[in-house]
Amino acid sequence: MRNDKLIPGLILVLIGAAFLLNNFGYVHFHWINILHLWPLFLVMAGINLVFAHNKTAWATILKISVLIGGFAIILFGNFGNRFGFWPHYRYTYNSDDNGDNNDDSDDSDSTSTPAKWGGKANFSEPYKPGVKYGRLNISGGGTSYRLNDVSSELFEADTHGSRNKYDLTDRQDDSTSVLDFHMHNHNGFNWGSEKNDVNIRLNPNPIWDVNVETGATDLNFDLSKFKVKALKLHGGAASFNVKMGQPLSLTDVEISTGVSSVEVSIPQNAACSIQTDSGLSSNNFDGFNKSSDNNFETPGYSAAKNKMHIHISGGLSDFKVRRY
């Protein structure tokens, strides 16, 4: 390979690999560093120009080392929330990854648990008897999520892992409580040597909507003890294992993945239909009859009073729906 093609090619490889790792949730970037550390681009370009005609091995190693080191600092460095673009000019920004700077002070029914860094952290939201509906929104990748137990509180979560930060927000409107459980970016870069776990418990009294947005995740939810109206799981390279209880009048399950393993368990006597849009994925639906292209139903589905509808979409995944 000619040296004059090496550096541009390496830049493209680094950028492409960085975006892939971010999309699948393996790493998390501090994009604001691009504004703070922009002079590093000048350093990298300058080194490459100075040694452009030097074909020795040490010059090539130097150029590659400066390039990789510069990209690593820009993408993974964590320098707090004060940044400068031009010299002597400073500004602060809201470090919430959602970028949401809205003022919620006029919402008297909104409560927020301060964000907690990793290690062992506990989150809890009390249950109020007037709450009939609960909506749980979970976001964050690179974590193992478990939901298997009930709680006398509305919501509880125990987290473990020293590099992640989580926060919990509760908004109440009449008889509905909306819970946002959010994982922030990593504090620095982690090659995945440490496992991050979240164990969640819910109150069984409300009717629940559960929405999970994640990247690379191992998720195991036993929802058979809860009244679930809707479940949405969106992930990249994930492993989803979900056990559903009896459906309500209509229970919607929507699963969208990239390259993943998905197993959904439903009660033996539950009326259920499946709609698939799964590309090259493998489908295994025991006990279902094919009603039309990409549609499957349990016997007697049309006449059932309570029904479950499962919509599955994905690229190259392994989908299983079994009856227990």
Image: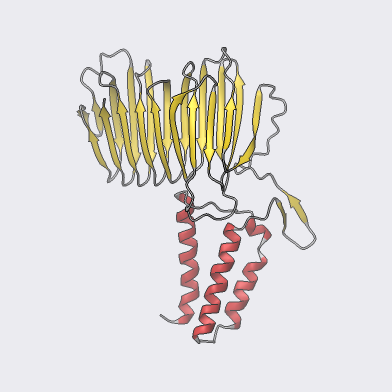
Residue 21 vertical position relative to residue 143 in the rendered view, above or below:
below
**Residue 319: percent from the left, percent from the top?**
29, 38
Residue 212, given in percent of the width and then of the height, sits at: 46, 35
From the viewer's side, name the closer residue of 284 and 226.
226
Colour option used: secondary structure
Q: Looking at the image, is 56 positioned above or below residue 199?
A: below
Instruction: Using the rendered view, name the quadrant where residue 106 is placed.
Output: top right
Quarter of the image containing the N terminus? bottom left
The residue sitting at 51% across, 28% down in the picture is: 136
Q: Nearer the viewer, residue 40 or 120?
A: 120
How many numbered callouts?
Answer: 0
Question: Residue drawn 28% across and 14% down?
Answer: 304
The vertical placement of 292 against 143, above or below, is above
> What is the quadrant of residue 52 in the picture?
bottom right
Question: 25 or 11, which is in the foreground?
Answer: 25
Q: Find the residue positioned furthest to the right.
A: 88
Residue 74 image-quadrant placement:
bottom right
Residue 66 in the image: state x and y as whole percent.
57, 73
**Left or right for 113, reference 60:** right
In the displayed structure, would residue 61 be above or below residue 68? below
Q: Position of residue 109 (x, y in %)?
A: 66, 21
Residue at the image position 45 percent from the left and 55 percent from the top: 20
Split into 4 quadrants, where in the image is the C terminus?
A: top left
Farthest front residue in view: 120
Q: Residue at (40%, 31%) from the top-left corner? A: 221
Q: Nearer the viewer, residue 48 or 153?
A: 153
